[in-house]
Image (tube, coloured by chain):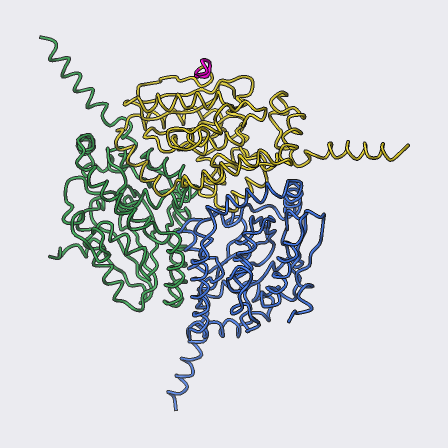
Chain colours: A blue, B yellow, C green
Amino acid sequence: MPNTNSAAYVRVIEETPAYWRVLFDYPPFNIVDASIFEALQDLLVRMNASTSLRVVVFESANPEFYLSHFDLTGKLGNIMTAVGASGLPILMDTFVRLTRSPVVSIAKIRGCVRGVSSEFVLACDMRFASRENTRLGQPEVGVGLHPGGGGAERLPHLVGRGRALEIVLGANDFDGDTAERYGYVNRALPDAELDGFVDALARRIASFDRRAIAAAKNLVNDVSLPSADRLLDAFTSFGAALMWPEAQRRVRAVVERGLQRDADFEKSWPEALGTLLDTEIGSKSSLQKKGATP
Amino acid sequence: MPNTNSAAYVRVIEETPAYWRVLFDYPPFNIVDASIFEALQDLLVRMNASTSLRVVVFESANPEFYLSHFDLTGKLGNIMTAVGASGLPILMDTFVRLTRSPVVSIAKIRGCVRGVSSEFVLACDMRFASRENTRLGQPEVGVGLHPGGGGAERLPHLVGRGRALEIVLGANDFDGDTAERYGYVNRALPDAELDGFVDALARRIASFDRRAIAAAKNLVNDVSLPSADRLLDAFTSFGAALMWPEAQRRVRAVVERGLQRDADFEKSWPEALGTLLDTEIGSKSSLQKKGATP
Amino acid sequence: MPNTNSAAYVRVIEETPAYWRVLFDYPPFNIVDASIFEALQDLLVRMNASTSLRVVVFESANPEFYLSHFDLTGKLGNIMTAVGASGLPILMDTFVRLTRSPVVSIAKIRGCVRGVSSEFVLACDMRFASRENTRLGQPEVGVGLHPGGGGAERLPHLVGRGRALEIVLGANDFDGDTAERYGYVNRALPDAELDGFVDALARRIASFDRRAIAAAKNLVNDVSLPSADRLLDAFTSFGAALMWPEAQRRVRAVVERGLQRDADFEKSWPEALGTLLDTEIGSKSSLQKKGATP
């Protein structure tokens, strides 16, 4: 049953018949929940139906949050259980179909992009980030989970095993410059130049022939995409991890601290993950202390 | 039937029995046609026959053009149809045998290196480029085609999927610094230091034992070369693309604009690809306008 | 039969139950011989036995030498012949088990790290190097051998084929900045910041759950580790190369020049490899000259 609003959260601006801009606009933080995936699924159908389309640029209406992260309050609808056109669960299906689409996808990044949102930009064909205003990362391990939407499979090919493990196990933010240096994004550009650079590249690609673009992308895909098997393993492992008691405890802790509610915390929460349970342990031991004193 | 001149276009300078320099010298632009491939095939035979040879440095006699690009005026001889020693078509066979040779190949890059020429340097073991004087790219998609000589297969391993797609789908030039930052070349060096750096490295390698070099290169090859199947897919797809009407229209347009004829255009043509058909469409619509007025 | 001293050469400092520092302290140069491998094998058993451990930082007690290189004077015990828990020979088994361990390994690099020592840090999950004080490389080809402990298999995935071939065939040192630029290490940091950066990262990871860390590392491993078959091929080829007469001649020459004996030579020996046999040839021809004159 379609969410009648989801289209508004992921708005299409048809710059030309060959070049669309797609705006994420899901206040307050562009949290990635079932509504976002529903809108992306609708968009994929619309992209497939257009024979004039060459390139889509994904950007955010909110400069603080590109897409923030996976919803940790349960608004997941059927994205973990229902299967999409590729035969993979909706969450993974969305990313896999984007990578295989004959249409070119470009992520134009400003603001926070973490976890499943990082996996979204990794599924885009290219990534350009604001030098001053990018916080990109895979913080799942810091809340007791791990990347489950392709991040662990796509990062090693882009940045090598060592940097992939630092990103995934360190569970912290990467700014634009470090992300460029690591190969996590194609380039970090001064914020004032980002729109112009991406627009020029998109218009250039939009001027090329659909068949040449599709054939070239297919050849690159053939030697660079992770297998569906590996992606499904990660997804299944992630689904299991959501049930781990230690993960649920950390998710509860991060939500109690203000995730998805407090804008300041939402901007900086990965920083807090290294001491996430300290206060909790603190209050527990102070409780025990209280219990110990008559 | 051997082209008696081809050897002059690809000249060998035997610095020592272990270290050869190979100069591309095929005026006016070092266009890559059947003559160049014939000379490279002869060179491979000569390299194989030498038991003292360790390393070959490939450079250009013309500082403006390393190797410019694939001949688009039909001087292809049998390089698309005849099969070489590896069992692959001559074009691909040349590159594949270079990668598998026990002799080390180093591309010392100055000037323009586009399309099939980029694929040549990607088939070399190492690439060092002039910081001030390098224009490297895979502009095929901009003329309605796609890389067909291994570029789409080798780039993702070097620069990651995102940057490979930017290079291949953006179809534009990369300067030395960006090429280094992306991993497209090993290093970009100040032009004044390039010769000294490469010469010292080549002489160093030339002092080592042939068996150690060959064994080490084999081990690296085993985990880094694309499969012959993938390369053949790309080649076959490229052969088909040459017949696409939209590709032929773009090739015609770029040749009409001055490719392989006008030195200024030859230096900068990828810049023009984003607006290649605009004048043509302009003249068509002005024709239609004329037709509409009595 | 355990070497009762080996534990002292590789000392464990338990910063917390979740975070250990491991110090290489095997004077004078931290040469990698059977004692080091024995100590590392013991350490792997101890790491596996701890259920609280999350992360191990490997560093050197000697700022000039992290681990210098493979012992070239024959103190190899059974590391080439006996088989470890993974079914691979001890040398390779040590590295492979480190990559697959649920515990995270971080190399904190100061000083010289060459050959098998480079292969050790490549087997660690992450590598952070002193910007001012790092000499990292795979100089085996310069002594007539080739990497045999995984270097040729791990480097291409990290730095691409071109830079891997430059490292392996050039057989020279890389400083911290170049190693970072190539992706050989995660980052080069100013020496004064290196300890603080690595300590903060290790404590952060140590605060995370063991199950999340292990699952995330497994997913990354599944798409980034070389196969045991490829590693065994390299090891076998290396074992054969040790018997090559030309290799033995070069090993003899480098030992005669002062390797494992002279501290200055030990610090800079890869520089000398390009002219290693020149004096030998010189003295031989002067001998011949003497023989020729009555």
In the rendering, at what x and y percent does residue B256 appear?
A: 67, 25
Q: Is residue A266 above or below residue C117?
A: below
Q: Does the magenta-highlighted stretch encompass residue B3?
A: yes
Q: Does the magenta-highlighted stretch encompass residue C99?
A: no
Q: Quadrant of residue A62?
A: bottom right
Quarter of the picture containing the N terminus of chain A is bottom right
Q: Nearer the viewer, residue B278 or B267?
A: B278
Residue located 30% across and 58% down the image: C21
Q: Residue furthest top?
A: C294
Q: Residue furthest left?
A: C294
Q: Nearer the viewer, residue A146 or C284?
A: A146
Q: Nearer the viewer, residue A290 or A221?
A: A221
Q: Nearer the viewer, residue A55 or A288?
A: A55
Please give left or right for residue B41 compared with residue B279 in the image.
left
Q: Is residue A154 above or below residue C275?
A: below
Quarter of the picture containing the C terminus of chain A is bottom left
Q: Quadrant of residue B241?
A: top right
Q: Residue furthest bottom?
A: A294
Residue located 28% across and 26% down the image: B207
In the rendering, at what x and y percent does residue C263 appear?
A: 23, 38
In the rendering, at what x and y percent does residue A283 appear?
A: 44, 79
Please give left or right for residue A76 compared with residue C206 in the image.
right
For the record, the magenta segment spans B1-7
